[in-house]
Image: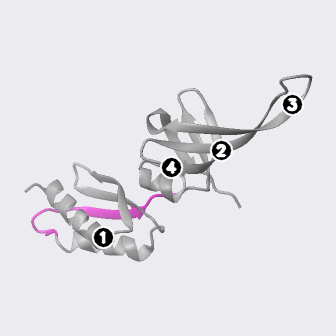
Amino acid sequence: MTFKEKVINLLNAGLEEKSALFLIDLTITDANKIIVTLDGDNGVTLQDCIDISRAIEHNLDREEQDFSLEVASAGLSTPLKLVRQYQKSIGRTLIVKTEDEKIEATLSAVNDDYIVLEWTAREPKKIGKGKETVEKRLELPYSKIKEAIVTVTF
């Protein structure tokens, strides 16, 4: 079994014990630096990171293979990648970039194929001069999303 396979097996075992957590990214560099990025249905606590770190580190032998390990939660500015991340962000405002446009809207629904965004916009009136406020709704397939980031409001 390769070093990478050992790390993956240990990580999966650690995540099985904490079902609310899920893996966003795993990187193992040529210098054996292991970088684990996690997210969770209820967020990620420091203790979650410690537990996953221990699940990996305590089962690897530094005498056999030297390594460094970094376990962290997905940051606020980390783009959403998984359907599970979108599901926990329902009701929040996202900035979504597609091939053609950049949309800031509220995520109102999610399924396995697409997300639903809702927002208000000012558009020219159909009849007469001036603008009117209109409600917009868009079903956007995941394949069309280049990047989606949750916005933070204070």
Q: Position of residue 93 (x, y in %)?
A: 63, 51
Amino acid type of the residue that numbered disc 3 sits on in the rendered structure: Lys
Q: Quadrant of the C terminus?
A: bottom right
Q: Position of residue 126 (x, y in %)?
A: 83, 24
Q: Identify the residue at horizontal 34%, vertical 63% (top origin).
A: 70
Amino acid type of the residue that numbered disc 1 sits on in the rendered structure: Ser
Discs 2/1, front: 2
Give the Cα distance between marks 3 and 1: 55 Å
Q: Residue furthest front?
A: 127
Question: Pointer 1: residues within 10 angstroms few (<14), some, or many (20+)?
Answer: some
Question: In this image, 15 relative to 153: left or right?
Answer: left
Circles 4 and 1: CB atoms closer than 8 Å: no
Residue 110 disc label: 4
Residues 27 and 100: in front is: 100
Instruction: Looking at the image, tell me whether mark 3 or mark 2 is earlier in sequence order.
Output: 2
Badge 4 marks a residue whose secondary structure is strand
Q: Quadrant of the N terminus?
A: bottom left
Question: In this image, 79 relative to 101: left or right?
Answer: left
Question: Pointer 4: residues within 10 angstroms few (<14), some, or many (20+)?
Answer: many
Residue bearing mark 1: 53
Q: Which residues are drawn in magenta?
A: 60-75
Q: Quadrant of residue 13?
A: bottom left
Circles 4 and 3: CB atoms closer than 8 Å: no
Instruction: Looking at the image, tell me whether mark 3 or mark 1 is earlier in sequence order.
Output: 1
Instruction: Looking at the image, tell me whether mark 4 or mark 3 is earlier in sequence order.
Output: 4
Give the Cα distance between marks 2 and 1: 39 Å
Badge 3 marks a residue whose secondary structure is strand
Q: Identify the residue at horizontal 48%, vertical 67% (top origin).
A: 43
